[in-house]
Image: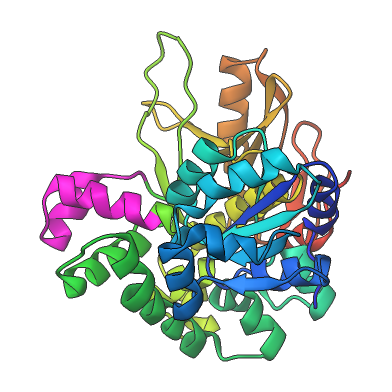
Amino acid sequence: MIPRDVAPLAAQLARQYPVLTLTGPRQSGKTTLCRSLFPDKPYVTLEDPDARRFAEEDPRGFLKGLETGAIIDEIQRAPQIPSYLQAMVDADPTPGRFVLTGSQQFELMSQVSQSLAGRTAVLRLLPFSLPEVARLHPVSPLAQTLLTGFYPRIHDRGLDPSRALGDYFATYVERDLRQLAAVHDLQRFERFVRLCAGRVGQLVNLTSLGNDAGVSHATARAWLDLLQTSYIVHVLPPWFTNTSKRLVKSPKLYFYDVGLACWLLGLRSADQVARDPLFGGLFENLVIMEALKTRFNQGESGEMYFFRDATGNEVDLLIPDGRKLRAVEIKAGATVNADYFRGLRSFAASFPDTLEGGSVVYGGDADQSRSDWPVIGWQRLQRPPAP
């Protein structure tokens, strides 16, 4: 097993809370991580029809056989279980007694927050980060890295990414989607998801998305919420404050795995990725997700933003640092030019008391020590973040 960056924190929290809850996309490595960290615990997956039926029909009986503790996988499949766990851990709050996993974030979190508030630590595990990939094998050139994505099975087993990601999406549509909501027109929903991939790194416009997919604004909103719930897309909110300056207040759209976005766009080779008009958006997606993985692996929230004003000044990523923000401009080009710093300079001039520091991450290899803003080659992202 490839060591996961969140593992030390997961082990630490299991020594402090009676329940540890780990959420994240399907095939992000949740089960593998939990079974390696807690090898002596009984393991039950609610994907198994017999186990799920037992948990649904007789939750007390189901849990009676697990009184000493267990790993319960895909807990959202039996939504009443957290309520019964509450009484058990109140009677015996031994740290690390239960470990729960789930691949739906909002639905699972509502169950956990209502029943296990104060009794569970919650962590999120996304697919591999660049540092984790680098522990397994040398990181590929940029276009191939974007095409392959970061799902662990692809890297661990050397799978063809196009075939593996196609199977992943088919499984999502055929199984997970039917559990989450009644989407009657699967063909139109798949078109909607592909349209989302075509807007990677762009502002969300539900009216445009709905019109292009042939559905109403309300349906487009519901489907986008569904994609967020199931860890397919991530919506990055804008940062704004009370100011007279007009700021953009629509969020931007990204995918939790950039490889899946490439597959949905029909890209099947690194050359196609490198030539695609959305190459810049895909690179931006990569960097945004690396920042999000770093925050999650350190037990932080997913709180991050972007900035854009009405005149087009923009900073691609703002990361909270105490009460201030660190600004990151993301450029896919391999040659640094003066335009790379325009958004950072504008933000620093408009909000000098808000900015803690900033940098440019670009598609080249060499770092550059500029006087105001350090320039970081994308391959530096494969190094573990400084503690």
The structure residue drawn at horizontal position 20% and vertical position 65%, both measured from the top left corner, is 183
Q: Is residue 131 left or right of residue 62?
A: right
* Location of residue 208 with respect to 33 vertically, above or below: above
Q: Is residue 352 left or right of residue 102?
A: right
**Residue 14, horizontal then vertical, whole percent:** 80, 50
Give the main secondary structure, helix, strand or loop, of the magenta stretch.
helix
The answer to whether residue 99 shows anywhere in this view is yes
Residue 91 at x, y = what percent? 71, 40
- Residue at 74% in and 36% down: 373
Q: Which residues are magenta?
A: 203-227
Q: Quadrant of the N terminus?
A: bottom right
* Residue 278 in view, yes or no: no
Q: Quadrant of residue 172?
A: bottom left
Q: Nearer the viewer, residue 336 or 202?
A: 202
Residue at 21% across, 51% down: 220
Q: Quadrant of residue 287?
A: bottom right
Q: Out of 285 and 192, give the one closest to the viewer.
A: 192
Report the quarter where the C terminus lies: top right
Name the one closer to the observer, 13 or 305: 13
Say if 36 sits above or below 251 in the image: below
Classify residue 381 by image quadrant. Answer: bottom right
Magenta includes 187? no
Q: Is residue 211 magenta?
A: yes
Colouring of the image = rainbow
Q: Position of residue 385 (x, y in %)?
A: 83, 50
How many numbered marks appear? Answer: 0
Residue that extends furthest to the right in the rendered view of this protein:
387
